[in-house]
């Protein structure tokens, strides 16, 4: 019994030292806010880039052989080549390296590290979103394009009004999972001095020389967030399955 009381007193003292003294808990709450902001804005940017690249890549695969030679076909091939290069480079290099290149080289003169992180993570996410959306577009039966043409739509209108809505319905759970992956990837934002959730825990650890509670708290917060968003994804998937019946 005495050992339990002693452990509880030590735990209480450690908790007060790490989170109550000098209001160190604010490092956690501020870091959580920055993490969620970076994740949300990066996903928006990633979805925007991903859709554009997915349309270019899928349109190239579907229409290239039917196109006549000329400047238009050359520019289309060039755009597809740039998209493929983007996908190769971004998916083939670590996100933390991309983040540091953005912060220390490309945007070295910028003081807005939060927006630099959003751009870096958004560009990284865009490469994965592009392949997710592209797989959704390619999964749509070719008859849908023929149906669009029979209604008088050109290729662009068919893609926007007929194909993309169906493709998004198919890949929405995968996009939601990409949000969860992105949430965890932002834990490296501290490499460019951003006070995200992980950096908040590190600041407390460095100040108190106590690693257990700050890092466990950070891990638990990430775990709760992932469980919460995973639950939302599961609910979304069930509703999509019911709507297909």
Image (cartoon, helix red, strand yellow):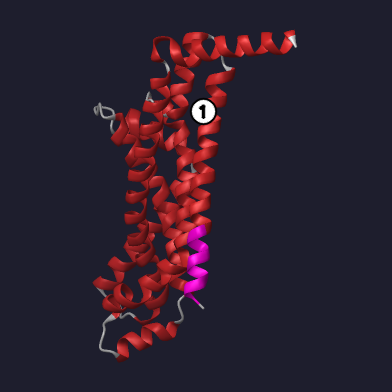
Query: Can residue 169 be seen?
Result: yes
Q: Is residue 17 above or below residue 61?
A: above
Which quadrant, please, contains the N terminus? Answer: top right
The quadrant holding residue 115 is: top left
Q: Residue at x 31, y 29 (%)?
A: 113
Tell which of 166 and 218 is nearer to you. Answer: 218
Residue labelled with disc 1: 218
Label 1 crowding class (10 Å Cα cut-off): few <14, some 14-19, many 20+?
A: some
177 with respect to 35 (left or right): right
Q: Under tag 1, what secondary structure?
A: helix
Q: Which residues are magenta?
A: 235-244
Marks counted in the figure total 1
Q: Is residue 94 visible?
A: no
Residue 135 location, x and y as percent? 48, 66
In the image, 189 versus 58, the foreground residue is 189
Left or right: where 168 falls relative to 68 = right
Residue 222 coordinates in the image, percent (x, y): 51, 36
Name the dominant secondary structure of the magenta segment.
helix
Q: Position of residue 40 (x, y in %)?
A: 36, 45
**Who's the residue at 42% across and 86% down the image?**
143
Q: Quadrant of residue 27?
A: top left
Q: Indicate whether 77 appears above or below 215.
A: below
How far across and how far down the image is residue 179, in percent? 45, 49
Kindly identify the residue that appears in the image at 38 percent across and 21 percent down: 26
Q: Nearer the viewer, residue 179 or 96?
A: 179
* Residue 55 inside the magenta-drawn segment: no
């Amino acid at each position: 019994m005495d050992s339990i009381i002693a452990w509880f007193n030590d735990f209480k003292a450690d908790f007060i030292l790490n989170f109550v003294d000098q209001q160190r808990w604010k490092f956690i709450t501020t870091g959580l806010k920055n993490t969620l902001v970076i994740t949300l804005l990066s996903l928006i940017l990633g979805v925007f880039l991903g859709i554009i690249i997915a349309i270019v890549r899928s349109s190239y695969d579907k229409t290239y052989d039917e196109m006549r030679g000329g400047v238009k076909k050359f520019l289309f091939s060039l755009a597809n080549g740039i998209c493929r290069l983007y996908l190769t480079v971004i998916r083939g290099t670590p996100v933390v390296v991309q983040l540091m290149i953005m912060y220390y080289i490309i945007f070295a003169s910028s003081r807005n590290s939060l927006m630099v992180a959003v751009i870096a993570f958004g560009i990284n996410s865009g490469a994965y979103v592009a392949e997710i959306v592209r797989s959704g577009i390619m999964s749509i039966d070719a008859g849908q394009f023929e149906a669009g043409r029979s209604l008088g739509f050109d290729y662009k209108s068919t893609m926007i009004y007929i194909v993309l809505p169906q493709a998004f319905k198919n890949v929405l759970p995968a996009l939601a999972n990409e949000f969860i992956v992105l949430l965890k990837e932002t834990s490296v934002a501290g490499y460019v001095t951003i006070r995200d959730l992980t950096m908040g825990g590190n600041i407390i650890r460095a100040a108190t020389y106590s690693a257990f509670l700050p890092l466990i708290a950070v891990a638990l917060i990430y775990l709760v967030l992932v469980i919460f968003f995973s639950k939302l994804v599961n609910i979304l998937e069930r509703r999509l399955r019911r709507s297909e019946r």
